[in-house]
Amino acid sequence: MKFDRNRLILAAAAPLLAVVTALVITSLIIAATGEDPFRAYQVMIEFGSKSDSQVWIINKAVPYYLSALAVAIGFRMNLFNIGVDGQYRIAAFFAAVVGGALTLPGFLQIPVIIIVAMAVGAIWSGIAGVLKTTRGVSEVITTIMLNFTAGSLIGYFLQEGRLAEKDGNLFHTPNIPESSHFFTFPTNPDPVGGFIVVAVLVGAVYWFVINRTRFGFDLRAVGRSESAAEASGVSVKRMVLTSMVLSGAAAGLVGMPTLLGESYNYGNDFPTGIGFTGIALALLGRNHALGMAFAALLWGFLDRTGSQLELEGYAQEIIEVMKGVIVLCVVIAYELVRRYGLRLQQRRVGEELAAQARDNGTNDKAGVSA
């Protein structure tokens, strides 16, 4: 394989430019509030490097990563699945209902709960896929509407006498038996959730399917040009529907670390908004399995250290500002580097063509002279 130095430089330039720009802009914003930006970074690093913070960050990053993967499946073929938030919540709700109603051994009940969650997520996302392929309805509109529909449906069933029970001021589904709680890794002071193993496996499968299979090639081909993919024999409608279903199935896993490792039921206090976070992380990680993992860890780090910054007297909104600046800087930096690389490639091709034309002209003159 020929070593391409320019390509390597451009690949390193994009994230480096994004990081430097984000740090500069964030520092200016913090300084504008009258606070010391360097002190803020010191507090974040010191607090984030503690062992309990590291465990917290890892556990927080797992559902973030699964959400980003669910979004990325659609992004790979220019499908904007904005409904991951509704898909994972309704999937977790019905999985909790099934888990609370069954009394199977743990090694059977845990897979059943996970399969139910993935199936519900796939069905809910598949509705948008069917509407797009049969009626041409934008998946952005349908998935946003399905988010509200999912919330309303959960609210209807999450009441005493229906599929939930009252516990103080909270309503939640019946608790999953202790035998069906997911395993953990014993670390000090808190354990790391075992669902990190599932997240790693799903990430590996995502990378392999996207980069090493015919389906992944077809998916990327449709994302780049539907007409070209159609001309080469790829069924665009089938790919759209399949991608939406797979995206929803992946979304069904997002709530499982919480359901099987923390809450053991679905209640009014079940985490929301993770699906929208996944959109930012998919953009930040450039839809790459490893890139999204780093993005999820970064988001967990910012969430963890943000509370400490607030205790140190910094504005509570500063972390959200940091997140927005980072995403914008990454998107803009990669686009600038991509355009610069394209110009370099065009210039190189032009120089090669000009050199070839000169060589041909020299050979023609030599032939005439002979």
Image: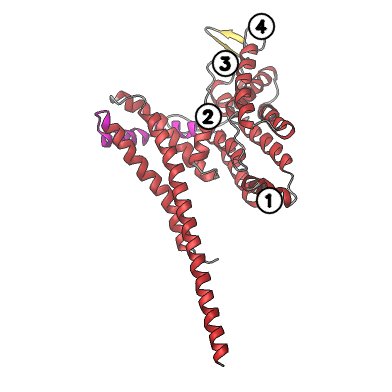
Classify 10 Å Cα crowding around label 1: few (below 14), some (14-19), many (20 and above). few
Name the front one of labels 2 and 1. 1
Gap between marks 3 and 1 measured at Cα: 47 Å
> Which SS class for mark 2?
helix
Q: How is the image coloured?
A: secondary structure
The residue where tag 3 is placed is 267
Earlier along the polypeptide chain: callout 3 or callout 1? 1
Q: Residue at x 32, y 41 (%)?
A: 24
> Which SS class for mark 4?
loop
**Magenta region, residue range:** 32-61
The residue where tag 2 is placed is 276
Gap between marks 2 and 1 measured at Cα: 31 Å
Overall secondary structure of the magenta section: helix
Q: Amino acid at mark 1?
A: Ala
Tell me whether circle 1 and circle 4 mark residues in contact (CB < 8 Å): no
Of residue 173 and residue 128, the one placed in the foreground of this image is 128
Name the front one of labels 3 and 1. 1
> Which SS class for mark 3?
loop
Q: Residue at x 69, y 34 (%)?
A: 245
Place of residue 227 in the rendered image (x, y in percent of width and height, measured from the top left): 69, 47
Earlier along the polypeptide chain: callout 3 or callout 2? 3
- Would you say 41 lies left or right of 360 here? left
The residue where tag 1 is placed is 228
Can you tell which mark lies on residue 312? none
Task: Give the quarter of the figure containing the C terminus.
Answer: bottom right
Q: Residue at x 48, y 69 (%)?
A: 351
Q: Amino acid at mark 2?
A: Phe
- Would you say 227 lies left or right of 315 here? right
Earlier along the polypeptide chain: callout 2 or callout 4? 4
Gap between marks 1 and 4 measured at Cα: 55 Å
Can you tell which mark lies on residue 161? 4
